[in-house]
Image (spheres, rainbow, N blue to C red):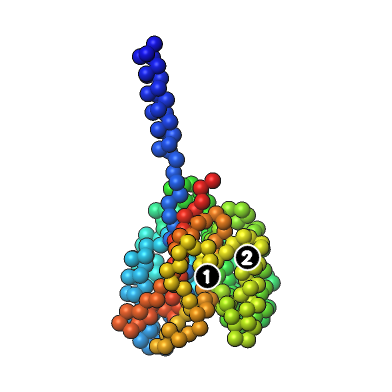
């Protein structure tokens, strides 16, 4: 009887140990947002060719899992794909839904994520019409999104990436409404991250704090999404996310326009605005915004 009981206990412990080994906690996730600055040959010392090595070095060191880019031209998209071979990407040109105009591509680590679905919609009264310009915007503006499956945990993650207009204010308010509507429609209650250059400062010189409060409250009330900066356990560095290629960039008002928003399915450990200049050359006219987080286990 003792021998049978011993074998039973050993078998039970082995089975429990096997089950415990099968539990796969969600690994940490690093998310970066970067308005890369479009390929403008008139940028002089800051032209794209001079910034490529800096961009490559940053991403090699940071090794993010998800990246939201803005202002990417077709040529730059090819350069980014070449320097980031471990990543897949999705996105469409804003002018025609193909290759015309700037992209807001999402890059994702292929060894970490499986791409399940993706699309692009326009921030306008006709979001499915390629090239449509919304409200008082100066240019077509888009949101690119990806539905991804984490190969490690098996969980789904939705990533939305956008670039709001920098001229019309109505288009920014309406853009917030449409973004919230689409996230709710597409992602539902699945874990969701939204990155982008929203062109909405915390304190606008003409419109004050109203646009930022609107952005913050709409995302919070409708989707329970908050800026990673304010839910992070530790803020390494914050402040302005743009530098404008200005030598006196440190004198700029400490207002962000680039954000990473997350819903309650993520616990953010750190938030950082990385100020990167090498040999007097800026990485872009915006700084990379980096948030490290962990998907919450059920």
Q: Nearer the viewer, residue 262 or 10?
A: 10
Q: Is residue 29 visible?
A: yes
Q: Nearer the viewer, residue 115 or 257?
A: 257
In the image, 130: left or right of 272? Answer: right
**Residue occupying the point 63% across, 63% down:** 220
Q: Residue tagged by mark 2?
A: 219
Q: Where, by quadrant of the figure, is residue 202 drawn?
A: bottom right
Q: Position of residue 133 (x, y in %)?
A: 64, 77
Q: Where is residue 147 in the image (x, y as percent from the top left)?
A: 53, 56
Q: Nearer the viewer, residue 46 or 212?
A: 212
Q: Residue tagged by mark 1?
A: 259
Q: Where, by quadrant of the figure, is residue 200 drawn?
A: bottom right
The mark total stands at 2
**Residue occupying the point 40% across, 22% down:** 9
What secondary structure is found at the residue carrying circle 1?
Answer: strand
Q: In this view, does 138 lie above or below 68?
A: below
Q: Where is residue 169 in the image (x, y as percent from the top left)?
A: 64, 80
What secondary structure is found at the residue carrying circle 2?
Answer: helix
If the image is split into quadrants, where does the N terminus sit? top left
Q: Is residue 36 visible?
A: no
Q: Which of the labelled discs sits on residue 281, or is there none?
A: none
**Residue occupying the point 52% across, 56% down:** 266
């Amino acid at each position: 009887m003792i021998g049978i009981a011993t074998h039973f206990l050993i078998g039970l412990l082995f089975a429990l140990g096997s089950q415990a080994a099968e539990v796969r906690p969600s690994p940490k996730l690093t998310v970066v947002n970067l308005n890369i600055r479009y390929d403008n040959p008139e940028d002089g010392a800051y032209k794209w060719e001079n910034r490529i090595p800096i961009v490559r070095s940053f991403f090699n060191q940071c090794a993010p899992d998800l990246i939201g880019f803005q202002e990417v031209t077709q040529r730059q998209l090819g350069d980014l794909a070449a320097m980031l071979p471990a990543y897949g990407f999705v996105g469409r040109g804003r002018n025609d839904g193909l290759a015309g105009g700037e992209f807001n591509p999402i890059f994702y680590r292929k060894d970490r994520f499986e791409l399940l679905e993706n699309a692009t919609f326009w921030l306008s009264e006709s979001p499915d019409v390629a090239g449509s310009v919304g409200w008082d915007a100066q240019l077509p503006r888009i949101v690119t999104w990806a539905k991804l499956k984490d190969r490690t945990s098996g969980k789904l993650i939705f990533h939305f990436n956008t670039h709001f207009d920098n001229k019309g204010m109505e288009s920014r308010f309406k853009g917030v409404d449409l973004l919230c509507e689409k996230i709710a429609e597409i992602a539902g209650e699945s874990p969701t991250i939204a990155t982008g250059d929203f062109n909405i400062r915390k304190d606008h010189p003409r419109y004050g704090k109203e646009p930022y409060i609107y952005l913050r409250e709409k995302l919070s009330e409708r989707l329970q999404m908050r800026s990673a900066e304010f839910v992070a356990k530790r803020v390494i560095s914050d402040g302005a996310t743009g530098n404008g290629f200005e030598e006196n960039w440190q004198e700029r008002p400490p207002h962000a326009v680039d954000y990473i928003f997350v819903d309650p399915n993520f616990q953010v450990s750190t938030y950082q605005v990385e100020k990167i200049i090498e040999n007097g050359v800026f990485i872009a006219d915006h700084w990379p915004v980096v948030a490290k987080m962990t998907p919450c286990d059920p």
